[in-house]
Amino acid sequence: MLRVGQRAHEIGVRMALGALPSTIGKMIVSRGLGLTGLGVGIGLMLSGIMAPMISTVLYGVRPLDPEVFLGVPLILMVVALLASYISGSSA
């Protein structure tokens, strides 16, 4: 996967052909959130499958605790949104 800095040439060509900076930013944010969403989805499925196996090592939380299953992916998505937005605005 290429980082924004590694795609500088492509972004420059797009802007030379008339792409607006806001369009480039949206492209970067949507790509970042799409990949993060895919990772969060796969992680939720795997953690749901693995939860019974790790229940013996958990302390103070149930294996399928809804707050954890909703809170952690939400935090990850917000961090990915901020990181993508910052990368997109500096491109």
Image (spheres, helix red, strand yellow):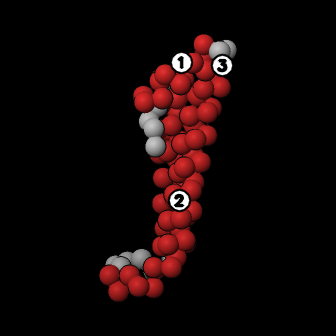
Q: Please give the name of the residue rendered at 45% of the width and 79% of the height, measured from the top-left corner.
A: 50
Dot 3, how many residues are within 10 Å of its Cα: few (below 14), some (14-19), or many (20+)?
few
Depth-wise, is mark 1 or mark 2 nearer the camera? 1
Q: Quadrant of residue 41?
A: bottom right
Q: In the rendered structure, which disc, 3 or 2, sits on the residue that comes first in sequence?
A: 3
- Residue at mark 3 to residue at mark 2: CA–CA distance: 30 Å
Q: Nearer the viewer, residue 72 or 12?
A: 12
Q: Please give the name of the residue rendered at 54% of the width and 49% of the height, measured from the top-left corner.
A: 35
Above or below — where is 63 with respect to 85? below
Q: In the rendered structure, which disc, 1 or 2, sits on the residue that comes first in sequence?
A: 1
Depth-wise, is mark 3 or mark 2 nearer the camera? 3
x and y, in percent, of residue 72 in the image: 48, 60
- Residue at mark 1 to residue at mark 3: CA–CA distance: 9 Å
Under tag 1, what secondary structure?
helix
Q: Would you name the residue on which mark 2 appears?
A: 40
The answer to whether residue 67 of the structure is visible from this angle is: no
Q: Is residue 18 left or right of residue 4?
A: right
Above or below — where is 32 with respect to 76? above
x and y, in percent, of residue 82 in the image: 50, 38
Q: Disc 3, disc 2: CB below 8 Å?
A: no
Q: Would you name the residue on which mark 1 appears?
A: 12
Q: In the rendered structure, which disc, 1 or 3, sits on the residue that comes first in sequence?
A: 1
Under tag 3, what secondary structure?
loop
